[in-house]
Image (tube, rainbow, N blue to C red):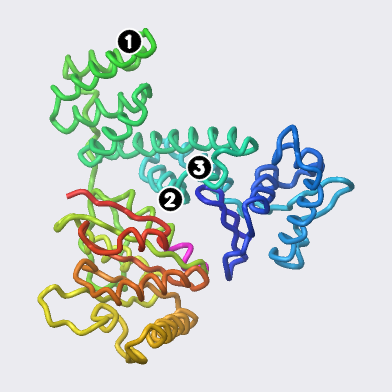
Amino acid sequence: MDYRILGPLEASDGERLLALGGARQRAVLALLLLRANEALPRDLIVDELWGEKPPQTAGKVLQNCVSALRKELPAGGGALRTVGGAYALQVAPGELDRDRFERGLAEGRAALAAGETEEAAEQLRAALGLWRGSPLSDFTYERFAQDEITRLEELHLEAVEDRIDADLALARHDGLVPELEALAGRHPLRERLRGQLMLALYRSGRQAEALAAYRDARRTLLGDLGIEPGRALQELERAILAQDPALEAAERGPRHVPPVNQPGRLAAQPLLGRDEELAVLEAGLEDALAGRGRMFVVVGPPGAGKTHLGDEIASRAKARGASILWGRGWDGGGAPPYWPWRQAIRDLPEPQGDDSEGRFRFFETVTELLRSEAERSPLMLVLDDLQAADEDSLLLLEFVASEVAEMPALIVALAREDARRLDELARFATRTLHLGS
């Protein structure tokens, strides 16, 4: 099983996403996951889900929820046991994404402490790639989830800070400044982030801005809390003023990149400054290879690196044994309907009539064709320049995306910010990535 709470609640048996039912049934599963392998008395579950004044039917509703979950879980729901007057959900090590994240975080921190910064950065980036949004986002206002949401959000931020420490040790400071500025804006009282921003600015040759970042941090701390910055931040300011050589990044030799024998659509050149986006897409690729299909939408202005990012993840997918399909829109005029799809699928069938029913049948046919291809080998589909695609091509993409969760397939849709139907596509996407120029 694969249970996921680092985002909306999801559960997969390795072949399909389970239908988890309505809000109450999903809440029961979420609570059992948070207390996995622990027998929870029925009265405690009722109190956690309904509060001090549960309806008279609460016990029966709980029983119905457990019964419905058992029907969805593999092996007749044997993992969801009744123990006296309690329920317990058996979760094996690694089945819950929270546990995988915490293990990856611990391993990354151990590598960082041992000075293995390259390994630490990779471990931490992989752990962060498990996140699909706010943890337990379906249950933000549920009392039973709030403490765990707070804890996980703090752990996530610490993991980001640890990963930034690793990147700073690897002299990747140039690409960190925009990210750190955004993080410091969201967490203005976080002194560790403020120090990382100061150091990244200084190492990027922006000493005056580094000192201005300290003054901004001091002003915020004094204004909001009435306190001076901590000793570490004060000492960093003094070191910057003194241009202390110890602040310089260590010299690094060329990074070893293992050879890739099977490039994707093109032999992608090294991709710089997109580690976060690559980590997200690689996590999606892992899911796809395991049979849990995903779609990602990548949006950005011309020259932002959308196609390069697609090339890179396609190269990695092909190296893992996936088949690559690539199509792109044409804005020069005169392209036939479904042009991106015709490029990607050589033997694309012809639409079955111009009416809505014919289009639906055509969409079904294309989806089944892709499903069959993915059953032979995992599949990656890249559709580029979708701002130039016709409306029907975008509708077909939405249709396929609504079915992709049960295929070993990864879809990456690339478009400029002015593309049509981006909001609609986002509804079907695991995540939309916005690239700056």
The 10 Å Cα crowd at callout 3, few under 14, some 14 to 19, many 20 or more, is some
> Of residues 71 and 355, which is closer to you in this image?
355
Residue 287 magenta-drawn?
yes
Does residue 106 appear in this view?
yes
Asked if the residue under mark 3 is in contact with the one under mark 1, i.e. CB atoms within 8 Å, the reply is no
The 10 Å Cα crowd at callout 2, few under 14, some 14 to 19, many 20 or more, is some
Q: Which mark is residue 222?
A: 1
Q: Which callout, 1 or 3, points at the residue further toward the start of the chain?
A: 3
Residue 40 magenta-drawn?
no
| Residue underneath mark 3 | 107
Measured as percent of width and height from the top left, residue 213 is found at 22, 22
Pick the quarter of the image with the N terminus. bottom right
Q: Amino acid at mark 2?
A: Gly
Locate residue 408 relative to residue 188 in the image: left or right: right
Asked if the residue under mark 3 is in contact with the one under mark 2, i.e. CB atoms within 8 Å, the reply is no
> Of residues 52 and 281, which is closer to you in this image?
52
